[in-house]
Image (cartoon, coloured by chain):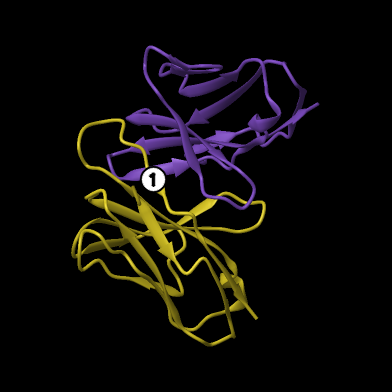
Amino acid sequence: NAGVTQTPKFRILKIGQSMTLQCTQDMNHNYMYWYRQDPGMGLKLIYYSVGAGITDKGEVPNGYNVSRSTTEDFPLRLELAAPSQTSVYFCASSSIQGGNQPQHFGDGTRLSIL
Amino acid sequence: RKEVEQDPGPFNVPEGATVAFNCTYSNSASQSFFWYRQDCRKEPKLLMSVYSSGNEDGRFTAQLNRASQYISLLIRDSKLSDSATYLCVVNSFGNQFYFGTGTSLTVIP
């Protein structure tokens, strides 16, 4: 009963380094999302995908890239890490089937950039 | 105007109290509505969906008022374990979810 799985759970990067945050879901959901949440703040949408091969920018896409080659996986790439990208990153997915389908969240990646 | 607005609180209530949160949304075409709970530094977790006729899950009651574009969450007989941030979420056009910034609740012994 995995749901949405994110790796790693914690990471410390140096300024200018790059990394990929992994997200995979086993619920066959079409929609997947990446959010960031800064301390004491709400969720901000970075990118989302409505299916394999399709991605769209959210509210705060600068400094990030995504890909969606399979239904299950939606990795988030940071190319040149900056201190402003220190945050908690959540991946979520939802189903296209029917109405009133909520989002399911992974347990987050806590990223610090020093 | 923000898509979803919530009173950030904080709400500090004694155990056993009844507390209510409201949330307003701007898009009259919004289709689905949810309340999520988020504990400190954890992921948001679905508390309940909100249906047009209103719905109840134990001590929790959710209401939707489409005419006035707001949803509400009522918590009865508050427990210490109810302390969390409650997020109002509105879904428009199928794939877009809009989150409120959350309402902080602390239940005091």
Residue B64 occupies quadrant: top left
**Chain letter corresponding to the colour yellow:** A
B108, A63: nearer the viewer = B108
Residue at image point 64% right, 30% down: B82
Residue B37 x/y as whole percent: 55, 37
Which residue position is annotated with label 1?
A104
**Residue lying farthest front?**
A1
- SS at badge 1: strand
- The residue sitting at 37% across, 43% down in the picture is A103
Q: Chain of mark 1?
A: A
Is B87 placed above or below A56 here?
A: above
The crowding category of the residue bearing disc 1, from other C-alpha atoms within 10 Å (few below 14, some 14 to 19, many at least 20), is many
Q: Residue at x 21, y 50 (%)?
A: A28
Q: What is the residue that sits farthest to the top in this orientation?
A: B53
Give the answer, above or below, for where A45 lies relative to A84.
Answer: above
Under mark 1, the amino acid is His
Residue at 38% x, 12% y is: B53
Eyeballing the image, is A38 above or below B101? below
Percent coordinates x, y for residue A10 in the rendering: 55, 69
Residue A104 is situated, as x and y percent measured from the top left of the image, at 38, 45
In which quadrant will I find the C terminus of chain A? bottom right
- Measuring from the top left, give residue A24's x and y in whole percent: 32, 61
Letter of the chain shown purple in the rendering: B
